Amino acid sequence: MENNDILIRLRYALDIKDADMVEIFNLGGKIVTKEEVKEMLTKTSDSDDEYVDYANICSDNMLESFFNGLITYKRGKQDPKPEQPNKSTQFPKTNESINNILLKRVKIALSLTSEDMLDILEKAGVTITKGELSAVLRKEGHRNYKVCGDRYARNFLKGLAIKYREQGIQS
């Protein structure tokens, strides 16, 4: 799944307005305008059916900033602890692991438990075990790490949309 698709689906699922998208990017350390956000969410009409083009491509760095900003937006700014070194996470190079990061960061931002995530996937018609979910949420390089495919990422976002839009919960 492309970064722009992730932004579009996450924005829809959580009912995030354009102004809030700008704020989330800013909280993540990327200064963007409302027009740039709209361009990231707009498909161009002269694209092929197989490949979709966007007016403004969302890079991995931009998506990472959005995820970081979403966590801050939903949970508040966290003061760094003096005994902890400042960790800078390296965003993955492969699309498969971007899906893993999507699940991890949304889980953190929305304060979801593993049970909540299983319920969200079930709402979208996907049943996985707790062990499979745990493998997807592990750090890349861990011996039990599994790559999250596009199917699970899409269905997770679909389940989020069902949960947050059907119930009318604004979180």
Image (cartoon, helix red, strand yellow):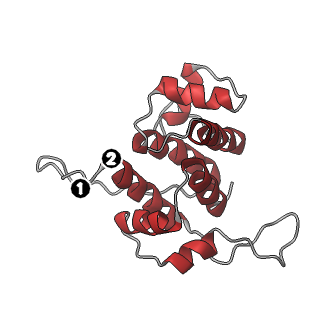
Height in image: 39 above or below 64?
below
CA separation in Å, label 1 and label 2 = 19 Å
| Residue at x 34% of width, y 54% of height | 72
Q: Amino acid at mark 2?
A: Arg
Q: Which residue is mark 2?
A: 75
| Residue at x 41% of width, y 72% of height | 30
> Going by the picture, which residue comes out furthest to the right?
49
Kindly state the secondary structure of the residue where label 2 is placed: helix
Q: In the rendering, at what x and y percent does residue 97 appear?
A: 57, 48
> Going by the picture, which residue comes out furthest to the left?
82
Q: Is residue 17 visible?
A: yes
For the N terminus, the image quarter is bottom right
Q: Point out the tag, 1 or 2, that comes first from the N-terminus.
A: 2
| Residue at x 64% of width, y 68% of height | 41
Q: Is residue 63 left or right of residue 30?
A: right
Q: Which residue is mark 1?
A: 86
Q: Residues within 10 Å of mark 2 (few under 14, many from 20)?
A: few
Of circles 1 and 2, the one toward us is: 2
Q: Is residue 94 visible?
A: no
Report the front residue among 19 and 153.
19
CB within 8 Å, label 1 to label 2: no
For the C terminus, the image quarter is top left
Report the front residue among 143 and 103.
103
Kindly state the secondary structure of the residue where label 1 is placed: loop
Q: Amino acid at mark 1?
A: Asn
